[in-house]
Image (tube, grey):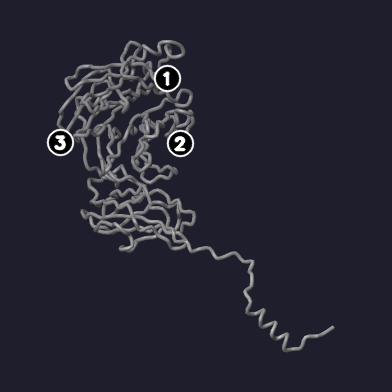
């Protein structure tokens, strides 16, 4: 065998070194230059005293890294020209409170998402808000706010009827600290009608509509002057002012089979519409029921579709009736227990304060008859009674009963709580809170 000389081997090796080689490695991917989608659903609300609460829809970016929060005194069109004031690393944390702002000054807010490659969509949907000082009032010695998370609560004042000072029943409005910013002391001639069902609500004209059970309905202005009344011993629990100026009233405190459970009253005091439960439920198993009334109807509201929602407490369900008075549907039968204050939510679910078994605020999907949300505490039991549940614009729920008004998040965290102190069990049962309404700054 012929062995190549060393010169030939060197030449072959040199040739192999300069020839192109084939690699099994995959080509490097192109750099990621696509930013996450623009953040949607941004809401900015005044939280008082130089604070504005922000919330937004969660980012859908799979490679999410952080949110950036921007604040400016001029409109933000492109976030690249502004420095963020805060960054949020958790994709599920879609809220932030901007602080140390000047009350009365208009601010603009924007939020972006950045991915792990550093891409940020700086085209933003910008919103504005003006922080304002909290209205201040007087401190009530036996009433206090013992929980207040300003970054999670829906800011405003809270209006409710207050009977716990027996010689001085009143309707009061308190700020987020529990200070009384407005009150109406009930006249002596109607104090005997301050029983369960003593209710108050704010009207669009800034007057207050007050239900005096078994006596009538008053509308008073902010100076405490009577501007309208409807006197009728067969009213109780609830009165609602309609957009046409009429007033819906309910009667259930001792109602008989022959009574109208709902009446619509025009400004002249004339009955223009009424609804009788006997036309639909005077049969078994309902006709022989009686506990503080036949139906003990305790709430009424007119729905956007023109129908009327009525809570029949003793029947343990809510009915929706059309303008002809026909029952369109019953809601919650077999689920609700002595329900109070039903509210149809924007998604069609219904929120009620369940009075029995156990005392809870419950949200029912009426299409499936399934409870999709519920909240209650052991402080509310048979003797104390949960009375009211209202869904707030930020998704929280304001719940009233016994000696407490609480605001809870969808995750069931208490973010605001007002407590009346010094009442024993019997007083809590007979003189506890009935209903409360949060009057938002942005109403």
Crowding at dot 1, Cα within 10 Å, few <14 / some 14-19 / many 20+, comes out as many
Q: Report which residue position mark 2 lands on.
A: 374
Q: Mark 1 points at which residue?
A: 315
Closest to the observer: 121 or 265?
121
Q: Distance between the residues labelled 3 and 2?
A: 39 Å
Q: Which mark is residue 272?
A: none
Q: In terms of secondary structure, where does tag 3 sit?
A: loop
Residue 152 drawn above or below residue 336: below
Label 1 vs label 2: CA separation? 21 Å
Return the residue found at the far right.
1
Q: Does label 3 or label 2 sit earlier along the sequence?
A: 3
Mark 1 in CB contact with mark 2 (< 8 angstroms): no
Q: Is residue 97 left or right of residue 103?
A: right
**Crowdedness near tag 2: few (<14), some (14–19) or many (≥20) residues, C-alpha within 10 Å:** some
Residue 433 in which image quadrant: top left
Query: Counting residues from the N terminus, which is met first, the one under dot 1 or under dot 2?
Result: 1
Q: What's the residue at 37%, 22% (across, down)? A: 320
- Mark 1 or 3: in front is 1
Q: Split into 4 quadrants, where in the image is the C terminus?
A: top left
Q: Do the residues labelled 1 and 3 touch (CB within 8 Å)?
A: no
SS type, badge 2: strand
Residue 148 screen position, x and y as percent: 35, 48
Residue beneath disc 3: 223
Q: Residue at x 23, y 16 (%)?
A: 271
Could you say which is closer to the camera, residue 257 or residue 40?
40
Kind of element beneath mark 1 = helix
Which dot, 3 or 2, sits closer to the camera? 2
Q: In this view, does 61 lie above or below 332?
A: below
């Amino acid at each position: 065998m012929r062995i190549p000389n060393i010169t030939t081997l060197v030449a072959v090796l040199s040739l192999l070194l300069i020839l192109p080689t084939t690699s099994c490695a995959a080509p490097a991917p192109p750099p990621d230059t696509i930013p996450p989608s623009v953040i949607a659903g941004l809401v900015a609300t005044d939280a008082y005293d130089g604070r504005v609460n922000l919330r937004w829809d969660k980012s859908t970016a799979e490679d999410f890294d952080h949110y950036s929060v921007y604040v400016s005194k001029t409109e933000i069109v492109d976030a690249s020209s502004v420095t963020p004031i805060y960054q949020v690393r958790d994709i599920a944390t879609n809220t932030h409170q901007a602080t140390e702002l000047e009350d009365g000054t208009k601010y603009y807010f924007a939020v972006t998402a950045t991915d792990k490659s550093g891409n940020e969509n700086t085209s933003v949907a910008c919103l504005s808000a003006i922080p304002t000082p909290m209205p201040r009032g007087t401190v009530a010695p036996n009433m206090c706010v013992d929980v207040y998370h300003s970054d999670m609560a829906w800011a405003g004042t809270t209006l409710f009827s207050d009977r716990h000072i027996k010689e001085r029943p009143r309707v009061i409005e308190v700020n987020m600290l529990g200070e009384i910013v407005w009150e109406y002391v009930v006249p002596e001639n109607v104090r005997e009608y301050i029983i369960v069902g003593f209710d108050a609500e704010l009207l669009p004209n800034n007057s207050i509509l007050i239900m005096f059970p078994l006596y009538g309905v008053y509308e008073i202005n902010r100076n405490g002057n009577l501007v309208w009344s409807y006197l009728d011993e067969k009213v109780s629990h609830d009165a609602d002012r309609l957009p046409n100026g009429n007033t819906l009233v309910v009667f259930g405190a001792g109602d008989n089979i022959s009574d109208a459970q709902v009446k619509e009253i025009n400004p002249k005091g004339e009955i223009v519409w009424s609804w009788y439960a006997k036309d639909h439920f005077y049969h078994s198993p309902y006709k022989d029921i009686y506990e503080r009334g036949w139906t003990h109807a305790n709430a009424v509201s007119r729905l956007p579709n023109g129908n009327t929602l009525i809570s029949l407490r003793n029947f343990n369900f809510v009915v929706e009736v059309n303008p002809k008075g026909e029952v369109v549907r019953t809601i919650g039968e077999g689920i609700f227990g002595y329900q109070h204050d039903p509210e149809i939510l924007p998604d069609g679910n219904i929120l009620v304060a369940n009075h029995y078994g156990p005392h809870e605020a419950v949200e029912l999907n009426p299409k499936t008859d399934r409870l999709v949300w519920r909240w209650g505490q052991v402080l509310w039991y048979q003797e104390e009674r949960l009375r009211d549940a209202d869904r707030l614009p930020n998704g929280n729920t304001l719940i009233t009963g016994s000696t407490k008004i609480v605001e809870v998040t969808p995750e069931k965290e208490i973010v605001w709580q007002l407590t009346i102190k010094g009442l024993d069990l019997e007083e809590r049962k007979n003189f506890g809170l009935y209903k409360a309404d949060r009057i938002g700054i942005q109403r």
